[in-house]
Amino acid sequence: MYKVFVYGKPVYLTDDLSFFQHTHHNHKAVYTNADDLGKMIKKIRRSGLISEYVIYSFDLLELWQAFTSLFTVIDAGGGIIRNRKGELLFIFRKGKWDLPKGKIEAGETIADGAIREVKEECGLNQVSLGKLLSLTYHTYTERNRCILKRSHWYEMSVPDGQKLIPQAEEDITEIKWVKPAKLTEIRNNTYRSVADLIDEFVGPALSD
């Protein structure tokens, strides 16, 4: 199964028939093939009544290849960053709390790009890379191009004492460390993909 935030709405692409059958009233469950997928994506973008979609096909690989062919795919890297106190690092950009991440540049590995972006966005000098935790997907439109961003999220840690400097040219206006038990403010004003990461790797109970 793939979960993609298509213009802000969760869309599940799956070949699991049981997942397709157990949808509730604010889901739209659809059987489709590769040829019809482009029309379906346009409907998802326009629809304001359905909160989530499930797109089912017998062949998940074919469905995923057809889906990605509709977009320009861009890789990004970022971090779920902790300090020695166990606090998590968040940035505030364009009215929402977010985790630091950015596009991978030509010639660099995704891991190197993730470290570079975290350093640049937060003004950090030392960042230690841990394991790859998750991939998230979301779409958006830029200069009349439909973009699918594939974000690679790494576990990261930083030593104490480093000054946090928001990267103003990236519209970052605030950076702060947040205790896991104090994540309500973040979850109330963040993207659903970030909330999913918090739930998966920090825990929903801690963030209430």
Image (cartoon, helix red, strand yellow):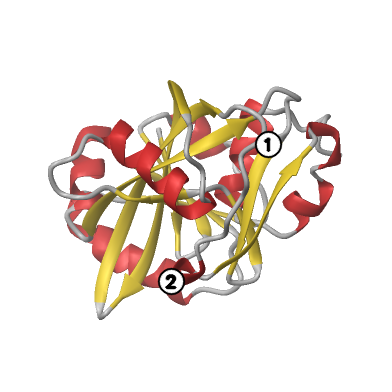
Q: Left or right: 170 with respect to 60?
A: right
Q: Nearer the viewer, residue 175 or 205?
A: 175
Res 203 seen here: yes
Can you give x and y, in whole percent of width and height, for residue 10 in the image?
52, 52
**Disc 1 residue crowd, few under 14, some 14–19, many 20+, Cα 10 Å:** many
- Element marked by disc 2: helix
Image quadrant occupied by the N terminus: top left
Q: Nearer the viewer, residue 45 or 194?
A: 194
Residue 77 in which image quadrant: top left
Which residue, given by chain and number where applicable, does mark 1 sit on?
Answer: 88
- Element marked by disc 1: strand
Judged by depth in the image, the label closer to the viewer, 2 or 1, is 1
Q: Amino acid at mark 2?
A: Arg
Vertical order, 204 against 12 (above or below)? above
Check residue 77 in the rendering and tell me which mark sits there, or answer none.
Answer: none
**Disc 2 residue crowd, few under 14, some 14–19, many 20+, Cα 10 Å:** few
Q: Left or right: 55 with respect to 52?
A: left
- Name the residue furthest top: 131
Q: Are marks 2 and 1 in contact (CB under 8 Å)?
A: no
Q: Left or right: 35 with respect to 52?
A: left
Q: Earlier in the sequence, mark 2 or mark 1?
A: 2
Check residue 45 in the rendering and tell me which mark sits there, or answer none.
Answer: 2
- Name the residue furthest left: 107
**Residue sitting at 74 percent across and 50 percent down?**
187
Image quadrant occupied by the C terminus: top right
